[in-house]
Amino acid sequence: MEPARKRGRSDMWEHFNLIAPDKVRCLVCSAELKYHGNTSSMIRHFTAKHGAAVNQGNTNQVDRKRELDEALVNMVALKNMVVHRYEEDKTKAKAVVQRVEAVSLTADMWTSINMDAYLAVTGHYVDDSVRLATVLLGVLPFLKLIQLETSMLQQGHSWNNGALKAK
Ligand SMILES: [Zn+2]
């Protein structure tokens, strides 16, 4: 306990400015306190007014850093899992589309939480057990699709029955 208390004392100068030889100002609430050459009144003020913060010395910063590191590791692991799952499903979807006789396509527009528009293309087909099945074929940002369409039209493709076809 003793080292933590010592650290707490010296850390008081992180929370106060000496504004006169006998006066300090709290950086949290701007309260001015008499300074008598030691930090005891500062500790008293800080513990009473900002009690939760006084115990958050270096140890909690280390904890916080470790939490952030762990979160980052989890994020990377999650991203790898998503990429892996995407590749798996893409392979499956390709195999399905190649096998079935006919695929009917539908397109859905949706908007992400930060208002980016996406166009999703879903294929509908009858599977081996004569059941209607669906497969998501692609999701692209809508803006990118418009750019793609424009560049394809410029390259001499044309719209035919709602599908972009080569001339
Ligand atoms: Zn204060």
Image: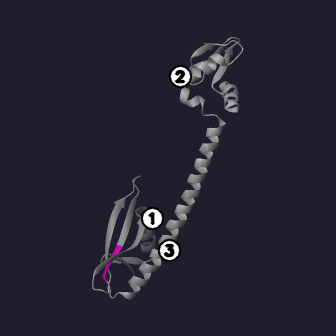
Q: Which mark is residue 144?
A: 1
Q: Is residue 133 magenta?
A: no
Check disc 2 and give the amino acid type.
Answer: Lys
Q: In what element is the residue under mark 2?
A: helix
- Going from N to C along the chain, the mark reached first, 3 or 2, is 2
Mark 1 near mark 2, Cβ–Cβ under 8 Å? Answer: no
Q: Position of residue 7 (x, y in %)?
A: 69, 30
Check disc 1 and give the amino acid type.
Answer: Lys
Q: Residues within 10 Å of mark 3 (few under 14, many from 20)?
A: few
Q: CA distance from mark 3 to mark 2?
A: 55 Å
Residue at x-position 70% and y-position 28%? 6
On screen, residue 127 above or below 4: below
Camera-side residue of 62 and 1: 1
Q: Residues within 10 Å of mark 2 (few under 14, many from 20)?
A: few
Q: Position of residue 151 (x, y in %)?
A: 46, 70
Q: Main secondary structure of the magenta part?
A: strand
Viewer-side label of 1, 3 = 3
Q: Which mark is residue 49?
A: 2
Q: In the image, 57: left or right of 75?
A: right
Residue 141, quarter of the rendered image: bottom left
Judge whether residue 29 can be spotted in this image.
no
Q: Residues within 10 Å of mark 1 (few under 14, many from 20)?
A: few
Check disc 3 and give the amino acid type.
Answer: Glu
Residue behind label 2 places its C-beta within 8 angstroms of ligand 1: yes
Q: Position of residue 147 (x, y in %)?
A: 44, 66
The quarter of the picture where the N terminus appears is: top right
Q: Which mark is residue 87?
A: 3
Residues shaded magenta: 122-126
Q: In what element is the residue under mark 1?
A: helix
- Going from N to C along the chain, the mark reached first, 1 or 3, is 3
Q: In the image, 83: left or right of 62?
A: left
